Image (cartoon, helix red, strand yellow):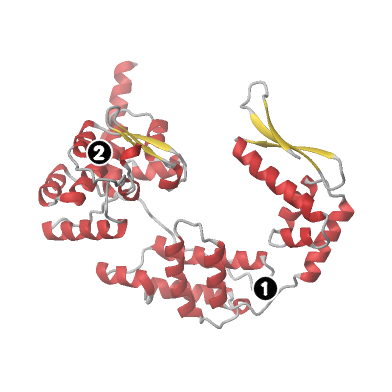
């Protein structure tokens, strides 16, 4: 039986290691991982591979979907000799030759099954509707070349999506697809083709040399106090609560709509977002200002129901867009309240790392896009520094 253990290194964080018996009966000690769960998960893999090695062909089957580099590392970790590694690699190549028959329709099904746990799978499925419509469900993926990918990209730029949910969204907005949305289509297709290659299906490597559409995702549209007052006065029910919390907490709309009473501490003014509720899949505590706490205290709880909201994100976004249109407010999105709050906190002197914890951004570059620094802000900072000098 294997085990996990923690080792302390001077001046460094503690790291987790695994210890187990390899395929050649020698004791293996490997690390390091940041958490006990990560170490336990890897130990489970190692032990499964060692057991599989004892049955002819079982280890080959267990590692067949890994890339050659990943297989080599896995075999080295469990103590395989160079000859044993070469044998596994040779058998996998012989048994799983490159298949040239996989079609675009089958590629869509493969991607959906492989990414069943992906949070944005619904978006991927919708985009594959467009991909299949353009290339053809029965078209072998081995025939998709770079010039055809470029033609697909140009089709999205000029004509937009003609199928699925994105077509309906464009019809409502009456505009073309954004560069970012076009690139999401291309990323889904590229990811699916890479998956097919890992599973030994032949492709023409069509993304070699193909450029994505340049993106400029920065927005400088912030809601004004007058617009906020108009929206709150004209809204009611869940939409009004959603706008209030979006305005004061900097949470994403999906995070707000997923709030549960059991994760709210109104006395302390804190909302706990567990990893499954956040985009970054990271636990996060969000401070609730008095305005947000007051709105939540006034909101009636449903008997036997932990969820604060009944609405889904799609209906909430549509309702907000409809409300803005009725009030003559142009170019405003529900997500812009997140920009507003982070900008206010930045101007109030909040450290960027504190802002990163509040917002849940993985990196500071993403946070920079959400925090609007104006020339006036920079001039005030310079003057403040001069006074202290």
Numbered marks: total: 2
Dot 1: within a 10 Å radius of its alpha carbon, few (fewer than 14), some, or many (20 or more) residues?
many
> Distance between the Cα atoms at labels 1 and 2?
51 Å
Q: Is there any visible trace of residue 252 in the rendered image?
A: yes
Image coordinates of residue 30 in percent, x first then y, are 74, 38
Indicate left or right for 55 with 206 as reference.
right
Indicate left or right for 386 with 30 as reference.
left
Numbered disc 1: secondary structure: loop
Instruction: Judge whether 347 appears above or below 211 on screen.
Output: above
Numbered disc 2: secondary structure: helix
Question: Which residue ends up furthest to the front in the rendered image?
Answer: 304
Q: Residue at x 51, y 82 (%)?
A: 136
Instruction: Judge whether 323 appears above or below 176 on screen.
Output: above
Mark carried by residue 202: 1
Image coordinates of residue 151 in percent, x first then y, are 49, 76
Q: Residue at x 78, y 50 (%)?
A: 50
Quarter-of-image position of residue 350: top left
Dot 2: within a 10 Å radius of its alpha carbon, few (fewer than 14), some, or many (20 or more) residues?
many
Instruction: Judge whether 302 appears above or below 117 on screen.
Output: above
Quarter-of-image position of residue 25: top right
Indicate left or right for 32 with 23 as reference.
left
Q: Which residue is denoted by mark 2 in the rendering? A: 248
Q: Residue at x 16, y 55 (%)?
A: 329
């Amino acid at each position: 039986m294997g085990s996990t253990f923690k080792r302390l290194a001077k001046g460094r964080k503690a790291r987790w290691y695994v210890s187990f018996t390899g395929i050649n009966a020698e004791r293996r000690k490997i690390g390091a991982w940041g958490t006990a769960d990560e170490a336990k998960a890897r130990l489970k893999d190692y032990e499964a591979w060692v057991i599989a090695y004892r049955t002819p062909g079982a280890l080959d089957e267990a590692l067949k979907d890994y890339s050659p580099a990943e297989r080599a590392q896995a075999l080295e970790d469990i103590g395989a000799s160079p000859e044993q590694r070469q044998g596994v690699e040779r058998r996998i190549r012989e048994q799983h030759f490159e298949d040239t028959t996989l079609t675009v329709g089958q590629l869509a099904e493969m991607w959906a099954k492989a990414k069943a746990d992906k949070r944005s799978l619904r978006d991927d499925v919708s985009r594959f509707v467009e991909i299949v419509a353009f290339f053809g469900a029965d078209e072998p993926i081995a025939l998709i070349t770079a010039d055809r990918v470029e033609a697909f990209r140009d089709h999205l730029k000029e004509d937009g999506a003609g199928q699925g949910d994105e077509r309906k969204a464009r019809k409502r907005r009456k505009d073309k697809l954004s560069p970012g949305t076009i690139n999401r289509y291309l990323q889904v297709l590229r990811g699916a083709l890479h998956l097919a290659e890992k599973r030994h299906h032949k492709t023409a490597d069509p993304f070699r040399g193909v450029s994505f559409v340049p993106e400029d995702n920065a927005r400088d549209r912030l809601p004004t106090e007058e617009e906020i007052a108009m929206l709150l006065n004209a809204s009611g029910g869940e939409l009004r609560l959603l706008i209030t919390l979006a305005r004061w907490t900097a949470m994403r709309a999906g995070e707000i709509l997923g709030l549960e009473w059991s994760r709210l501490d109104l006395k302390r003014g804190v909302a706990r977002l567990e990893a499954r509720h956040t985009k970054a899949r990271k636990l996060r505590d969000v401070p609730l200002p008095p305005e947000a706490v007051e709105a939540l205290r006034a909101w009636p709880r449903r008997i036997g129901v932990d969820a604060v909201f009944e609405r889904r994100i799609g209906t909430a976004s549509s309702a907000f867009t409809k409300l803005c249109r009725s009030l003559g407010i142009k170019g405003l999105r529900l997500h812009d309240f997140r920009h507003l709050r982070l900008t206010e906190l930045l101007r109030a002197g909040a450290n960027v790392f504190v802002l990163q914890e509040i917002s849940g951004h993985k990196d500071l570059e993403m946070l920079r896009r959400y925090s609007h620094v104006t020339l006036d802000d920079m001039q005030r900072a310079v003057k403040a520094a001069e006074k202290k000098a």
